[in-house]
Amino acid sequence: MKKKIFLIAALCLMLFGLAACGQTDPADVDYNGHSYEELKTNCQGTVQTLTSLSEEDKEYYRTNGGEALANMINRWDEAVLEYGSFTGFGDFEITRSGKTLTAAQTVHMAQRDILFTCVYTYHSMELEDVTIDGIFTVGEKMSTALLNTIMGISIVFCVLIIICLLICCFNIFPYLEKKKAAKAAPKQDVVSQIETREEQQTEAADDGELVAVIAAAIAAAEGTSADGFVVRSIRRR
């Protein structure tokens, strides 16, 4: 039993010793020929240069300095407009992930701290991009996420309500068609009545001609005048 306890204690000491050896000071690490202080000075110098640029200089670099420099100046101006003017520097941190090296400098602004991040390609140490982001607390991040969630749910419900209204409109269309048909029905009845009267008048005219022909034929057969004949009815077969 004592041997087992001793082995466990020895293993724990070894693990703690390895962990302590693995915690190397970032300031002592060589980053592909660049030191911690060089990268830190580079980030801080870039911030100070952006702070000291006049509007004429900014406009010149936007026009002649290339897209990357123009984007960095625009992002800095947006950060100053949103978070206030530069007041000082905070912590500096270097992170390597695969082929990318990230140097992040905390910058104190008048209203809120920001994170000025330079992203390098590790093997060539060429600057890929510069990002400037506000530093928010966990509570602020949670409140923003909650607002985004509420907004998304509200949009979904609004879309569902609109779809329901459209479906209800499809039920209204047959009712409107029936109403139009009901309004058109009296007009059709009037037209049919007029046509019936015209047919009756035509038949009456045809009957008169037929009576005249029959009376003339009888009068010719009897050798008398057709004035004395009276036709009571005509049966059609």
Image: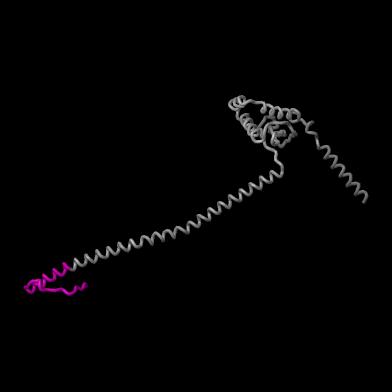
Q: Where residue 1 appears, x then y in whole percent?
A: 92, 51
Please report the bounds of the magenta region as a residue range: 208-237
Q: Main secondary structure of the magenta part?
A: helix
The stretch drawn in magenta includes residue 23: no
Q: Which quadrant, please, contains the C terminus? A: bottom left
On the rendered structure, is 229 left or right of 124?
left
In the depicted view, which residue is nearer to us: 138 or 45?
A: 138
* Residue 195 image offset from top left, x and y in percent: 27, 63
Evaluate whether residue 31 shows in this view. yes
Which residue lies at the image location 53% right of the left edge and 56% below the top edge? 164
Residue 49, horizontal then vertical, whole percent: 68, 26
| Quadrant of res 20 | top right
Image: 136 above or below 124 = below
Q: Nearer the viewer, residue 35 or 89?
A: 89
Residue 224 in the magenta stretch? The answer is: yes
Give the residue drawn at x 21%, y 67%: 203
Q: Nearer the viewer, residue 217 or 4?
A: 217
Asked if residue 33 lies left or right of residue 167, the reply is right
Q: Indicate the position of residue 166 as horizontal and vertical percent values.
A: 50, 54
